[in-house]
Amino acid sequence: MKVVNLKQAILQAWKERWSDYQWAVNMKKFFPKGATWDILNLAEALLEQAMIGPSPNPLILSYLKYAISSQMVSYSSVLTAISKFDDFSRDLCVQALLDIMDMFCDRLSCHGKAEECIGLCRALLSALHWLLRCTSASAERLRDGLEACTPAAVEKQLAMCLQRLEKTLSSTKNRALLHIAKLEEASLHTSQGLGQGGTRANQPTASWTAIEHSLLKLGEILANLSSPQLRSQAEQCGTLIRSIPTMLAVHSEQLHKTGFPTVHAVVLLEGTMNLTGETQPLVEQLMMVKRMQHIPTPLFVLEIWKACFVGLIESPEGTEELKWTAFTFLKIPQVLVKLKYSHGDKDFTEDVNCAFEFLLKLTPLLDKADQRCNCDCTNFLLQECNKQGLLSEASMTNLMGKRLNEFTTHGTEESTKPASVRALLFDISFLMLCHVAQTYGSEVILSESSTGAEMPFFETWMQTCMPEEGKILNPDHPCFWPDSTKVESLVALLNNSSEMKLVQMKWHEACLSISAAILEILNAWENGVLAFESIQKITDNIKGKVCSLAVCAVAWLVAHVRMLGLDEREKSLQMIRQLAGPLYSENTLQFYNERVVIMSSILEHMCADVLQQTAAQIKFPSTGVDMMPYWNLLPPKRPIKEVLTDIFAKVLEKGWVDSRSIHIFDTLLHMGGVYWFCNNLIKELLKETRKEHTQRAVELLYAIFCLDMQQVTLVLLGHILPGLLTDSSKWHSLMDPPGTALAKLAVWCALSSYSSHKGQASSRQKKRHREDIEDYISLFPLDDIQPSKLMRLLSSSEEDTSILSSPTDRSTSSSLSASQLHTVNMRDPLNRVLANLFLLISSILGSRTAGPHTQFVQWFMEECVDCLEQGSQGSILQFMPFTTVSELVKVSAVSSPKVVLAITDLSLPLGRQAAAKAIAAL
């Protein structure tokens, strides 16, 4: 009999009862010329013939199973054929299809072209949708109980469906293929919307939305079933499906660790070297560290507080102590507010509360900080966090109750020491806010208005009482005339007391009352009731404890002088002179000289217009700042390399970096230069052989490198790593554990620099000499031909090697890739260094020589994946050529689906093809 088509061949085999082996041999005779069975739709034709009757045809099914086992048909063609069957009432047919899926659903593979691998992804998505529909149909029948057969048979079928679902989804490889299919399906819909092509006619499409709807429907049906085991199994399947879109975002947090030296050092570095810098760069840096090291939020916040208290305890008396007080109680709460907003949906306040619970257990640390500052530091910190919305009122009260030291045993009566600290904190914050408003404009201070919320004191004062350029103040404005009884008591206090009292003083009320008090005093002086000696005593009282009172008094006097005639201004100007000069007394409040310097700068700004109009002169003091407390730290007559290795050894032994060490490292960086500094510290890291020490060294080195992260990264990735990777005599130094540690450090530095290098450098880094961009262009030359070659390398696939020699033959997908990559500025030094490093990595993976350098590349790629932020655009991995993926999966240590997904750009068609091919081959 001469066979005309596939259907006839199958029917003839069935009629003559051929065995599966005989069928396969004859099929190859009927269709000799190397026919591709998938093009002939063999799997679909066999299933169609097998499912004609009420029950499946066992002989034809045996042909299909043989075709699957002998790889005559691809898994994708079988899954696609199964997905087209929708008569779920035919139990025996459904069960037969489930048995066929059971043959291969947990070991899917494809070794064909990239397009065939993408086909497998799509087919698996359709099969998943089919399984969900099949499960829902069985569950519905069981729920409604309309079947003539026993419920046990329907329950058995439902259990079979759930078992296949669980088996399919429990494979990470399958979930990775589904992840690609979801992205491919979304891209396909976009291109169809733009009128660009569609799906193949023989391939049913299943959208991710349809899968989510089916999952929802299944959940509703199963909720009414009595079997807890089936419900639990379905919930497990649902969890696995919902995890597919975010499978790259799951990172295990470090719950076994309690100390995080990097966070500690970054905070100490900021408080020591960059107190007045903006908060946003610090927030981004801390979030980067948290993400890279997978630190749980409560322990992360705890480490920030620990660093602050250590800074307070360690700081030398004078300016440094003042800096740390301001940093701990003013700047860090602001940083935490920004961290709260970048934290996402999770309740950040609960994490802050948890962090304080941990902090309260560190009694020796807190006691030492209280002793150093002569007050209950934790209490002030809790109050500030409550004000900033970081702690609820109930949590604050609860935490305050858990802290029986000497500063909390005085009951409601405030003692002298806490009162002086409270006055000091008010004064520092007031002066800093004034300074910020004058430097950057008052609008940066204003908070977002919320209905019903009371405006903070400083905002009220600034908007109505603070003189600014182009702003005319009315000295008779109601804001200058508060409660008369408060004014009278303040005048009496200023006139009668030998010095301003601190205990129980409400400073914001005093600041609002001072203008009216000054008017009364000024009138009394002009009318001869008070002598000049009394005025001197009063002004000394005003400026002797808190400089903010003097600022508020001068603010009103400036507005008042504007309204007076030239001959009436003398006494007001004389009073401004009295308030502007420092008080020479031994009984001033802490950090008086430092505060006077800030106050003088503020008053100078305030008085500029009035002094210009009246041609008067006032000398504003600018002396009184202490000498730098960390000067001359390096020991004399010692080589700086010895100093560097010694200080690093001490820091490594201790496990954390203190303020003094930070200053020494900073001095050494200035003296030796970035390359010398980085190269010698990396040598110290590579000498370490103890695993726990290398991990600690990485955490500490990253923090030390934050002294100038951009330049250190360029040196590390552009000079030191290539030197180690290309010199076989140095490969031994890259073995585990130091090699793993160096890979981790390199990735952390690369990610930090790449995420921040587009923004402004911090004020600390701006002070440094910057290497000229031309230096990096000469070090990493890319002539007129090379950029295009580089882009072709970055956008080519292993199947498209002609691209390298003939760029004009590039396919649409790779053109899209290249055009997208052309947006990267290759004249930027960091981009050039990253591109060259990844080309080197690609060449190492493609070479036939294996060794520690190959292993280092694996560790580097694994760390890139481990630190990957879900949904991040413009990752450093965009500099990796597509061909690297296929090279990388040949290395067994890195052959995990998650790594492949992470290292390819899945937003590009070529990226999805490369990932699908690599994963399908695993």
Image (spheres, rainbow, N blue to C red):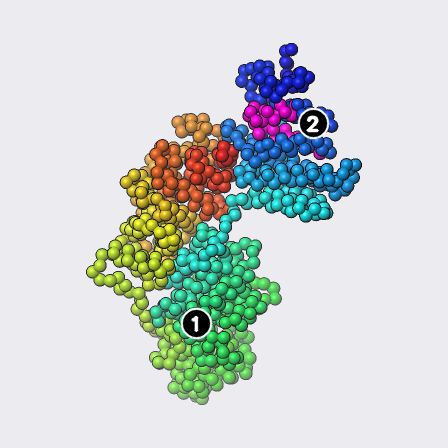
For mark 1, give the secondary structure.
Answer: helix
For mark 2, give the secondary structure.
Answer: loop
**Magenta stretch, overall SS:** helix
Residue 463 appears in view: no
Residue 599 spot, x, y in % from top left: 40, 71
From the viewer's side, name the closer residue of 908 and 92. 92
**Residue 781 in the figure: left or right of residue 262:** left
Residue for point 72% across, 47% down: 226
The quarter in which the N terminus is drawn is: top right
Residue for point 39% across, 61% down: 268
Q: Which residues are magenta?
A: 60-88
Residue for point 55% across, 75% down: 478
Amino acid type assigned to the residue bearing label 2 in the image: Pro
Mark-to-mark CA distance, 1 and 2 = 80 Å
Q: Residue 593: name its quadrant.
A: bottom left
Name the residue beneath numbered marker 1. Answer: 367
Residue 455 spot, x, y in % from top left: 55, 68
Name the residue beneath numbered marker 2. Answer: 56
From the viewer's side, name the closer residue of 693 and 114. 693
**Residue 277 in the figure: left or right of residue 58:** left
